[in-house]
């Protein structure tokens, strides 16, 4: 158990709909990351938040948005869903979100992943 | 264009032998690398990392080697055990805490 929780575990919805995925980071972790894993694909980085603020953006579609709340949990909102949005969505958390002591403590930047939310768009 | 490549989608190894998983990257600004292991229906779990100031990092049965000039890293598992059967992802970033780029993964099967 990584300490990162994601809800729901499974989500089935129709095209055109909107869903919200929720993530609670490990206690003490300030950074939250969202990833998408489509069938037989690697993990595609979507977006990172650090202490409530957007820190980095990856290949996130305009139909998708995220936020991190004062209690540090995060939500990923997916709207106008398409068939191709069916995927596993992972949330990860880490202690830091900024450049730190390069090489001194490599594990300080370790990301802990939640179990994922499997989204199926029909 | 994939910045992190794992050219072997799958690998089978006999129990007790060495497993070598390879990863190549194209971005010369990458300076921090991680390996993650993923079992079915679970999230990836951190395995081992290495920063660009080192060329080797060891943790028990797992060793990661980094060849910066070749933009190549490898994960060695010795001895391999059936419980090591999983998908292994290589990931890289330019700076601590910033965007990680993941490779497509290599599925390792350790045969008893």
Image (cartoon, coloured by chain):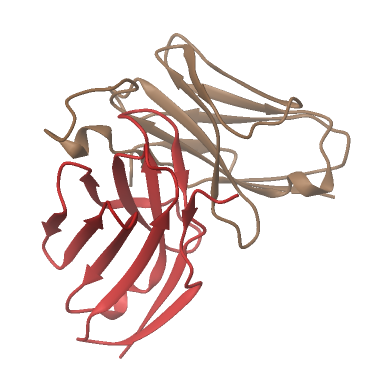
Quarter of the image where one finds residue A94: top left
Along the line of sight, the residue nearer the viewer: A4 or B47: B47
- B32 shown above or below A50: below
Q: Give percent across and percent down for residue B52.
A: 22, 43
Q: Give percent across and percent down for residue A66.
A: 60, 21
Is residue A68 rendered to the left or right of residue B108?
right
Point 38% across, 32% down: residue = A93
Point 40% across, 69% down: residue = B86
Q: Give percent across and percent down for residue B55.
A: 16, 53
Along the line of sight, the residue nearer the viewer: A117 or A59: A59
Residue A67 seen by the camera: yes
- Counting labels gives 0
Point 18% across, 63% down: residue = B63
> In red, which chain?
B
Which residue is outermost to the front? B69
Is residue A77 rendered to the left or right of residue A99?
right
Residue B38 seen by the camera: no
> In brown, which chain?
A
């Amino acid at each position: 158990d990584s300490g990162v929780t994601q809800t729901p575990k499974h989500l089935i919805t129709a095209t055109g709909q909107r869903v919200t995925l929720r993530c609670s980071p490990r206690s003490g972790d300030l950074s939250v990351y969202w990833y998408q894993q489509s069938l037989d694909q690697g993990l595609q980085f979507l977006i990172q938040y650090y202490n409530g603020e957007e820190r980095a953006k990856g290949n996130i579609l305009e139909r998708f948005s995220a936020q991190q709340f004062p209690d540090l949990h995060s939500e990923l909102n997916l709207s106008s869903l398409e068939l191709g949005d069916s995927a596993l969505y992972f949330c990860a958390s880490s202690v830091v979100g900024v450049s730190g002591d390069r090489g001194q403590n490599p594990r300080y930047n370790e990301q802990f992943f939640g179990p994922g939310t499997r989204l199926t768009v029909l | 264009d994939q910045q992190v490549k794992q050219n072997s989608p799958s690998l089978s190894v006999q129990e007790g032998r060495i497993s070598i998983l390879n990863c190549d990257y194209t971005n010369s600004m990458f300076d921090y690398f991680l390996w993650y292991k993923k079992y079915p229906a679970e999230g990836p779990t951190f395995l081992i990392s290495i920063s660009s100031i080192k060329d080797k990092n060891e943790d028990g049965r797992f060793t990661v080697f980094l060849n910066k000039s070749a933009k190549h890293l490898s994960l060695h598992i010795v001895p391999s055990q059936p419980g090591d059967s999983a998908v292994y992802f290589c990931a890289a970033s330019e700076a601590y805490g910033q965007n990680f780029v993941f490779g497509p993964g290599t599925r390792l099967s350790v045969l008893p």
